[in-house]
Image: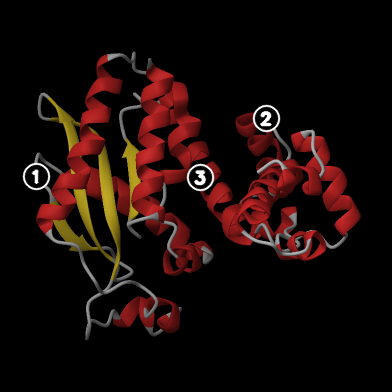
Amino acid sequence: MLEELFSELSGYLDLMKNKHNLNISVHDVAGFTREYSNYLLPYNIHDCSYCMEIKSKKELWGRCQQQQKRVASVLNDKIIFGKCYAGVFEYTIPFSVNHKLKAFISIGGYRKEGFNNDVILKKYFPEKYKELKIEIPSYERVKKISDVILRYFKLIYSCTELSESYDKDSEKDYIYSHIIAYLNEHYMEDVTLSDISSFCHYSKSYISHMFKKKSGKSISEYINSIRIKEAKKLLKKTNKQIKYIAFEIGFSDSNYFTSTFKRETGLSPKEYRISR
């Protein structure tokens, strides 16, 4: 039952992001989702391009983590709307049990016309800031969307025993979420372990070991899995030549793409396209 709930919840979050262009993140502060954490870890961060650029600065990475803790410390039972230290506006929706915070939801990635955060924007990424959305959804829409997520939280919480090791592992989850987000954004490039290490501000050996332990795959294997997933979409939805699809998703050699695709799916790209 739990796995079905997590699968449905992640599907709903995907729908809100891909079909309705909403940047939603979920933050478990109590540890009740850890048993199936891989379903929700991709939604554990603010992954809009501006936020990702901000966190590429080592001195700001920690401030983002502290921001989450600060938000959790002041939440009660009401939806709040405000901005973070980097000038990003968002709704924050708490999930509480007996008035004790267990998780919160963020719907954000917005800016306001005419707003200028002198400290952050002038020093770092003013152009990226302008890419944030200005069409802020209404309170009513946010409540309707978040109520669905909260219902899933209630069901999951009622079926879950809390993990005592959550505080110990939560930082690893945070880093892992950022690696996933980075790879999803850059999979079509020649991503190296050094690139990821630099972005996350941790050593290459730590990143490699932790990622393998959490995902069961090496970083290169995970990148290929993303590429194959995208290749399937392109093979089914377009008539692009296979060699061009290979290059588009990050393979420099179309023959290597074909062999990788067949190893992952049991079919060659041509056979997969015919079977659609």
Left or right of residue 259, residue 89 in this image: left
Give the residue pinned by disc 2. 216
Check the image and report above or below for 8 versus 137: above
Q: Secondary structure at mark 2?
A: loop
Compute the Cα span from label 2 to label 1.
39 Å
For the residue marked with disc 2, what is the amino acid? Gly
How far across and how far down the image is residue 3, in percent?
Answer: 43, 21
Check disc 3 and report its element: helix, strand or loop: helix
- Judging by the rendered image, the residue that carries numbered circle 1 is 78
Rendered view: 186 above or below 176: below
The image's mark for residue 177 is 3
The location of residue 93, given as percent across then percent down, is 19, 45
Residue 24 position (above or below residue 248): above
Which x, y percent locates residue 141?
15, 54
Question: Looking at numbered disc 3 in the image, what kind of residue is underneath it?
Answer: Ser
Secondary structure beneath disc 1?
loop
> Of callouts 2 and 1, which one flags the residue occurring earlier in the amino acid sequence?
1
